[in-house]
Amino acid sequence: MLRDRIRHKSLLDRVITADQAAAMIRDGMTVGMSGFTRAGEAKAVPLALAERARTDPLKITLITGASLGNDLDRTLAEAHVTARRMPFQSDPGLRKLINAGEVMFIDQHLSETVEQLRTGQLPPVDIAVIEAVAILDHGGIVPTTSVGNSASFAILADKVIVELNMSQPTTLEGLHDIFIPQRRPSRMPIPVVTADSRIGLPYIPVPPEKIAGIVISEKHDSFANVDKPDDDTRAIAGHLTDFLLNEVHKGRMGYDLQPLQAGIGTIANAVLHGFIDAPFHDLKMYSEVLQDSTFELLDSGKLTFASGSSITLSSEMNAHILPRLAEYKHHLILRPQEISNHPEVIRRLGLICINTALEFDIYGNVNSTHVGGTHMMNGIGGSGDFARNAYMSIFVTKSTAKKGTISSVVPMVSHVDHTEHDVDILITEKGLADLRGLAPRERAEVIIRNCVHEGYRDALADYFDRARARGGQTPHVIEEALSWHVALRERGTMMPG
């Protein structure tokens, strides 16, 4: 029943069609849309906006929490609606237009976007389009499977369009913890002191008069594509487990470790899956995306609580979790991304942060965004928020890509997202490099010995020997530093010829 979802009686008169809602969005506007890593995005209104643009062209600045699902980024970009996009995306169609220079993409740390909106460093949000599971009797909006930047968009925008998704279960109510930091310079500390700290409201506080329209939707979130662990990812997980066990044996932490954070994607998901068979217990998670491995760890009894900003699941896991969501709720919380990714909280809780690299170099600099140094893949996301402020910053990747034609360990990264100063541990299926307390020359020796594929190891060792002969704190043969990337472009492989 619609009245069960729209509990503020006067708002029942504001139910409109997606086309009517899309008509409120005008050329040149800045639009804040819900959605974080293919979860909880508004679905009907963006599709209506793209359809309208085919006969009534318009361009907008589109800001979200992270990536959108249901091919919405591609649909909006190919309809030439998206002129400017931030802070993250993962759609191949949009990526193509970004790399062609047709869409201006601003790649941001995920904790920063609403801070800049709040202080006027970015143009103000004209309209917020927020997916909800319910609107409460006082007008508060209950989000669906993500929070992301939705709360701040709704609070800061001139108008709010609510997309009420009837396919999302009402058991989502009570899962969210909406806390908005105070304005600077008199901001008080964020009172998250444990992963399960609840500090805010279970809804987004919005005056009812600000809700300009309510669109009814029944479209589901996109499902995550989660590959099963393979030999390489199991090896990476094994190296990490052995390393953490050694940290426990040295008395640096207990078997409950420190709270865990893991980036999205197949490798990070598989590495977390490896904790199921490890001897750790009573684990906590303070992360962005709660993915399949989160719930596998909860089901195994190894994980006791998980804090995130969205829930993104495979179709199989979604079918398992959503009907039983009430059973999981006391183990879960969804927060705004400026809280899940806040440097103050990350540093206070002392997180073990596991993120994925596209490539890293012999000194520990990490590229997580640009293929060949020029072409955007997805964006930095939250990895920078976590890496710089972590108790332990870990980056994982397979040692090669594209059937061995690309080495993931190179003389110099073609683009730097995380400098050597923010990277503690590097892991490939070949081994683990603990970089803590090592100078650059020592780092290079450990990385080459432990992490490089055997097909590239001799060539990388030769490069380092010749660089070292030239001297310097961080030795390079500067005219050859990017030669591996040049070889890939010209010959189709980094493999020594």
Image (spheres, helix red, strand yellow):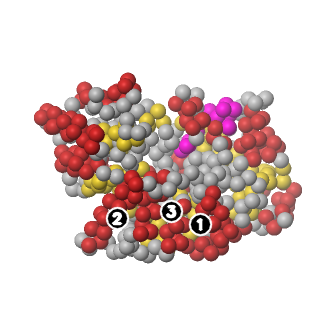
| Position of the N terminus by quadrant | bottom right
391 shown above or below 92: below
Whether residue 303 is visible here, answered yes or no, is yes
Residue 491 placement (x, y as % from top left):
37, 25
SS at badge 1:
loop
287 shown above or below 76: below
Determine the image quadrant of residue 408: top left
Contact between labelled residues 1 and 3, with CB atoms less than 8 Å apart? no
Q: Nearer the viewer, residue 496 or 421?
A: 496
Residue for badge 3? 293
Image position of 90 (left or right of 5): left
Q: Disc 3 marks which amino acid?
A: Ser
The Cα atoms of the two marked residues, 3 and 2, are separated by: 16 Å
Decide: few, some or many residues near mark 2? Use Cα within 10 Å; few <14, some 14-19, many ≥20. some
The region drawn magenta spans 75-90
Residue at 31% over, 69% down: 245
First in sequence: mark 3 or mark 2?
Answer: 2
Q: Nearer the viewer, residue 8 or 392?
A: 392
Residue for badge 2? 241
Residue at 65% over, 71% down: 324
